[in-house]
Structure formats: C-alpha cells, structure tokens
C-alpha cells in the first residue's frame, strides 16, 4: 500500500470504528450493566424481600411447596437464594406437555410462601440485549459476534496506529478541543487495554460454534444438539418405576454434599421422578464458586435411599481453558469489589467507543466550520451519535421508570418495559433529526440527568423502599442501585452543562518564530 502499513491500519481503525461504533456502544453499555444483572432484577421486583441465607432451610421450604403443588411432575428444579438473588426459585415440568408445561414460582426465603412479584424483564433484559439485540435467533447473536470481532480488530489496529501509545497515556491536555478528546481516548484505551482484549476475544470464544462450525459439522453432522450435550453434559434420563416411594429430605442430602465440598454454594438442585422408587437428586455447584464453568461440579443421589451415585469427573485442560475464558467474560465469580472493577472497566470501554465517534465527527466538522450548512453525511453521523449515546441513556431510564409506573397487574408487563425502552430510543432519534446538534445533545443529556436523578425519589414514592428505608434495613442492593442512578444523573447533568456552553472558535496558534516575524513586520510598517 502506498500510504504504508500504519496508515492502512489507521484507516481500518477509523472506518470500522465509525460503522460499527453506534452498535458497539449499546453492546458495551448493556454488557457492563449485566455485571449487576441480579441486582437490577432485585430492584425491578421490590416485592421479593431479602433475608439471611440458610440453604438447608430454603431446601426444606422448597421441598414442602413442591410436594404440595407439583407432586405429579416429572422433574423439580430449585434455585437457592444467594447474596445476589433473594428468592427461592422453584419450577416443575408436567409430563406430556413439553416446554409449555413448565411452571415457575418465586418463594419467600423466610416463610416459603409464593411471592406475587411484578412481571419484569429486569437485569435479564440488558443481559440478553447485550448479545441478542432483541433480534430473532440467531441473527442477533451473529451481529453481536461480528461486532465483537470488529472491537477486537479495532484494539489491534489502535495499538499499531499509535506507536507512542504508552507515552501518550501520560499526556492529557484539557480544554484543547479535539486534542483533549484524543488524549482521553488514548489514556482510557491504554488503561484498560488488557481487559478489553480479554472481553473481545472471550466473546468470540463463547460463540465459536457459530463463527467456526466446520469442526462441529465434521464430527457431528447435522446433530448439533449432540455436540452441546457432550460439551455441557447431559442429564441422564431415569425411567420412573411407577412405584410410590417417599423422597429423601433434601437438607440431609445437602449436608452430604457439604461433607464432600465444605462451603460449596449450590447453584441449582434437580429432582427427577419425585416420589417414585427411581427418584434421583442432583446438586450443581454455583458458577460463582469458580472462575471457570465446570460440568464436573455436581453430586447425584438416589432420591429414596440418599445413597451417593456420582460426583462428576475432572475436566480436560482444553475444556478448562475454554470455560475459563467464558467465566472471565461473564464475571460470575467476581465478588462485590471485583464486580465494581469490571463495571468501571466496562464503562471505560464504552467511553473509548464514544470518544472515538465524537472525534471522527469533530475532525471533519472543523473543515466545514465556515460553511453555513453541514454536509448531509456529517449531519447523519451527528444524529446517529446523539441517538446512540444520549438517546440510549434516555431509553435505559425509560425502562426503569416504566418498571415503577406501569400497573403491577398489567398483562405482558415485562414486554411493555421493553417497548418503553425501544420507543424512547426511537423518539431520541427523531428528536436528534429535528434539533440542532449541540442543542439536541444538551436537551437529551439534561432530560436523562433528570430521569436518573429522580429515580430514587420515584422508587421511594411507589414502593416505600427508598434510600431511607433500604439503608436502615441494610438492603445495600436496593440502596446501591438508587445511589448509582443518582451518580449517573449528576454526570449527565455535568455533560449537558458542557453542551450548553458556546464553543470557542478555533484559532490557529502561531509558533514563536512566526509570531516574532509578524511582530517584526508590524514594527517595520509602523516606521
């Protein structure tokens, strides 16, 4: 190439970043929010109260409820409460009804009573949007995987393009317009570069079966379900004997698991053929207990005698490596402080994408600063920048506001929350088209600041679980959400105030030599 390798990489970095940047911003922001998926879901369903954790008691309550309400079911499923999920989740499958025959309920962890919580997609919506984009399967996953590849490519080309990138990391010149945006882009990019490389690469590993299916097709042909069964392990089908027999007490079986793995947290419990002579109980360890997802972390028991049947086999090194990448990407193992670090790095990645989009437009706007009208293609980029960033923040706020304002008994309430999100996002695009650039930025950021800052007030008025209550009872998940919303509101208010300021005209600064020459000419002309 005539312009050289680095120039070609700069061109690739710039244009792929622009074309996919708007979608990448949404993917990164919702993915970052997903690190607090369970906390968002807890805020979205305030009817579910948090209690002190007691796994054995929770198992006893779940078994009592299922025995009374799901006796004929072919399988029972139980998810125990955790530091992040306050409810006991139970489910069962009715024989002969397929997927539609599955029923699920949330139980209070102290009483075992069914909790009538409002229907909400909660944090699950942002988690699913992150890699499915609210598109039909598998198109959303294809598109998000392609965007992950573009992000990975952008990181590599960015490293090649900025040969002094680590020197520039220590350089920041505030108040210098485009130079300040570039300094911030470089500094944030270098600071969290290892994290972003890991996130981008691991997302490709997660969906490798889609982007590199040749090996799977060669080994399994069209039977891809068999591949997933081998990969994640398959449930051994146990044929019911047709002889009624009492199920062993689940707390007793849990105690046996604790003898083999002291302190292990259980992610789920499955009971096959409950109240049958061939009943089987399987405990699966919580994913939060390990960095890597491990199929072997399960314990099976005879459901009647309580005799241990199996405890899994060790994973191969290759499988552990692949599952470690998946675990690092999702961050389920992270404790509160590490999860906040994940969140901060995710926000930094979102900021890198946003600053890149702003720089692309700003650099080209300078060339047309004296023109009365901006070229159509630049105006299009400006509109998409506004809608993809400030508009997305407004859409997120609309999701949370709808969670509190929609009637609790509304049919399909969870989908109406999603409709509010998508509807406000679409309106932000229309608003960006109708309003001048800086005014549109300021108005959307200002409205977003108001919406986020008032969320704690709205929460307190509609649920009685405002900051005064949540802090008093020690519900730091609810309080943390409200405080984070307040912080986001303050940040958006600061950004809106910056947009309301009249930009200073670009003035070319003369070098010392040029300035001296100009002064000399002026002095000669004066004489």
Image (cartoon, rainbow, N blue to C red):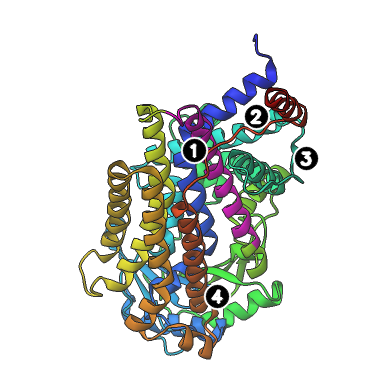
Q: Residues within 10 Å of mark 3 (few under 14, many from 20)?
A: some
Q: Residues within 10 Å of mark 4 (few under 14, many from 20)?
A: some
Task: Tell me the distance, in whole angstroms, between the alpha carbons under discs 3 and 4.
Answer: 42 Å
Mark before the other along the chain sequence, 4 or 2: 4
Q: Nearer the viewer, mark 1 or mark 4?
A: 1
Q: Which residue is mark 3?
A: 166
The residue sitting at 52% across, 44% down in the picture is 504
Q: Which residue is mark 2?
A: 157
Q: Is residue 52 left or right of residue 373?
A: right
Task: Tell me the distance, in whole angstroms, between the alpha carbons under discs 4 and 2.
Answer: 42 Å
Name the element at disc 4. Answer: loop
- The image quadrant where one finds the C terminus is top right
Above or below, 229 relative to 108: above
Q: Is residue 395 left or right of residue 202?
A: left
> Label for residue 82?
4
Residue 285: name its quadrant: bottom right
Name the element at disc 1. Answer: helix
Q: Which residue is mark 1?
A: 21
Query: What range of the chain is rendered magenta?
Result: 341-370
Q: Nearer the viewer, mark 4 or mark 2?
A: 2
């Amino acid at each position: 190439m005539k312009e050289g390798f680095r120039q070609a990489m700069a061109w690739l970095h710039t244009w792929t970043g622009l074309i996919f940047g708007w979608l990448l911003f949404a993917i990164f922001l919702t993915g970052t929010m997903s690190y607090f998926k369970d906390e968002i879901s807890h805020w979205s369903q305030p009817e579910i109260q948090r209690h002190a954790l007691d796994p054995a008691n929770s198992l006893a309550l779940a078994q009592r409820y299922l025995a009374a309400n799901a006796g004929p079911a072919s399988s029972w499923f139980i998810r125990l409460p955790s530091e992040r999920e306050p409810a006991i989740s139970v489910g069962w499958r009715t024989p002969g009804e397929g997927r539609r025959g599955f029923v699920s309920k949330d139980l209070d962890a102290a009483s075992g009573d069914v909790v009538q919580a409002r229907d909400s997609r909660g944090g699950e919506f942002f988690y699913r949007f992150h890699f499915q984009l609210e598109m039909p399967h598998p198109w959303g996953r294809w598109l998000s995987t392609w965007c992950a590849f573009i992000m990975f490519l952008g990181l590599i080309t960015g490293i090649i393009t900025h040969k002094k990138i680590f020197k520039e990391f220590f350089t920041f010149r505030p108040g210098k317009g485009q130079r300040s945006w570039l300094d911030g882009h470089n500094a944030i990019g270098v600071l969290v570069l290892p994290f972003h490389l890991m996130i981008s690469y691991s997302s490709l590993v997660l969906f490798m079966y889609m982007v590199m299916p040749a090996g799977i097709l060669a080994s399994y042909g069209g039977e891809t379900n068999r591949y997933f069964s081998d990969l994640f392990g398959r449930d051994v089908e146990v044929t019911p004997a047709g002889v009624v027999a009492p199920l062993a007490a689940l707390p007793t079986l849990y105690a046996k698991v604790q003898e083999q793995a002291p302190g292990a947290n259980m992610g789920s419990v499955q009971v096959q053929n409950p109240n049958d002579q061939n009943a089987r109980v399987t405990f699966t360890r919580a994913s939060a207990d390990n960095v890597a997802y491990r199929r072997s972390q399960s314990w099976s028991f005879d459901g009647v005698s309580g005799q241990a049947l199996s405890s899994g086999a060790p994973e191969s090194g290759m499988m552990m490596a692949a599952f470690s990448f998946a675990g690092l990407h999702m961050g389920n193992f992270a404790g509160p402080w590490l999860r906040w670090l994940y969140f901060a790095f995710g926000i930094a990645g979102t900021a890198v994408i946003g600053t890149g989009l702003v720089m692309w437009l700003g650099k080209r706007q300078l060339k047309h600063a004296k023109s009365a009208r901006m070229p159509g293609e630049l105006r299009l980029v400006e509109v998409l920048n506004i809608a993809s960033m400030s508009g997305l923040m407004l859409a997120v706020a609309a999701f949370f506001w709808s969670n509190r304002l929609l009637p609790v008994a509304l049919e399909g309430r969870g989908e109406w929350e999603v409709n509010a999100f998508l509807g406000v996002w679409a309106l932000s695009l229309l608003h960006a088209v109708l309003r001048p650039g800086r005014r549109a930025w300021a108005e959307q950021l200002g409205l977003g600041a108001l919406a986020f800052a008032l969320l704690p007030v709205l929460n307190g008025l509609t649920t009685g679980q405002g900051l005064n209550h949540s802090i008093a009872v020690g519900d730091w998940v609810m309080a943390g959400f409200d405080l984070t919303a307040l912080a986001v509101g303050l940040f958006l208010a600061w950004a809106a105030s910056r947009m309301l300021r009249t930009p200073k005209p670009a003035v070319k600064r003369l070098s010392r030599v040029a300035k001296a020459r100009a002064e000399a000419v002026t002095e000669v002309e004066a004489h």
